[in-house]
Image (cartoon, helix red, strand yellow):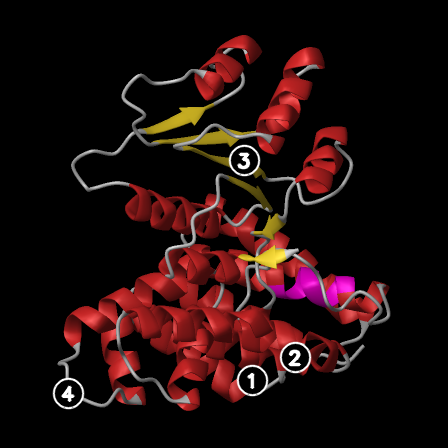
Amino acid sequence: MRTAGDILRAVQAGNIEPVYFLLGEEYYLQYLIIEKISKALFDEAKQDKTLLLPGELSNKEIIDQLTQTDLFASKKLFILRNPAALRNKYREELLDYCRYPLQNHNLIIIEDDYSDRKAMTKDLKKNLDTISVQIPFANDMKKWTRFFFKEKHILASDNVIDALIEIAGDSVYHIANEVEKIALNISDDAPLTLDMIYQFSGWQRDYQRWEFLQAIGLRDLEKALLLGQSLFRQGQKMLGLMYPLTSLFQELLFEKLSSGTLSVKKGYIPLPPSVVKKLPQIAKRFSKEEIQYALLLLGKIDQRLKTTNEPDESLLSQFLFTVLTAHG
């Protein structure tokens, strides 16, 4: 199985294949591959790109569009989503097309479901090289950060890359977006520093929020209170902290119940990489009963936010004092 990075490098080198099979649900990587192939095939003003969606088009219409020849032999790019929706003879016709694609036609097949449960996925994997566009693990984010900096001709040290991942490493899209912002603000000859990362990325409040979650994980009451107050001064609301707080304690409970055996999970976790990495160590600082009680308190705070005008600072302070000073 090849990676999205393999394909992007090949396309950049001018190697365009007639059929691609993308497997996985990272939509930004799907978008990136489609855009790079599209730019390699077409002039900006003359793009012939067709989205084939089962449900909007019949199976017959999809196959007819793919196999229709053009008198002028012009280039065409087709994007087919959810190939498993093709049934019976149309499924076989798609597989035949993959084996013998038309000249000047390029096809990108996208299946979000990474598992092998669908028969069509198995058949496509037998006939085509599969390209993984699964949501990357945290350690793959470094490669993608380097890739985006290289595209913008920006030299970035390991420290700078680590800092950006800490700030925006919850998704490939966020990393790409932050590198774009940095590229717009930095001069060509200026070395990229940590200060610039914090200045240009626009994620300062999120970074403080993640430090806040780490302080809670370390049971550092004083730091958690100070960071909480700082967030409120920047306009953060208690309602906006409920999701990351609940996510943190849900993940800690999962860690406890799995006894650490499922600590490395696929997919998106709504917590910063630094916190996700430390979940096993953080979980040791709390008993299962403390975690369950924290989730119960968060449920009660959610109700109070909806039914009372209690100040956010008061609700957060009560929560932090109760959870971080308890030992059960």
The residue that mark 1 highlights is 221
Q: Quadrant of residue 285?
A: bottom right
Q: In x, y percent, where is residue 190?
A: 17, 88
Q: Amino acid at mark 1?
A: Leu
Check residue 189 in the rendering and tell me which mark sits there, or answer none: 4
Q: Amino acid at mark 3?
A: Ile
Q: Are marks 3 and 1 in contact (CB under 8 Å)?
A: no
For image coordinates 46% across by 23% down, the residue present is 52
Q: Quadrant of residue 226?
A: bottom left
Residue span colored magenta: 248-254
The residue that mark 3 highlights is 109
Mark 3 or 4, closer to the camera:
3
Q: Along the line of sight, which residue is nearer the eye, 22 or 317?
A: 22
Q: Along the line of sight, which residue is nearer the eye, 321 or 249?
A: 249
Task: Say which element carries label 3.
Answer: strand
Measure the C-alpha gap from mark 1 to mark 4.
43 Å
The residue that mark 2 highlights is 278
Q: Earlier in the sequence, mark 3 or mark 4?
A: 3
Task: Say which element carries label 1.
Answer: helix
* Above or below for 106 versus 168: above
* Above or below for 27 versus 195: above
Q: Earlier in the sequence, mark 3 or mark 2?
A: 3
Q: Quadrant of the N terminus?
A: bottom right
For image coordinates 86% across by 70% down, the residue present is 259
Is residue 204 found left or right of 265 in the rendered image?
A: left
Membership of 251 in magenta stretch = yes
Measure the C-alpha gap from mark 3 to mark 2.
37 Å
- Residue 167 can be seen, yes or no: no
Measure the C-alpha gap from mark 3 to mark 4.
41 Å
Mark 4 or 2, closer to the camera:
4
Question: Badge 1: few (under 14), some or many (20 or more) residues near its Cα, within 10 Å?
Answer: some
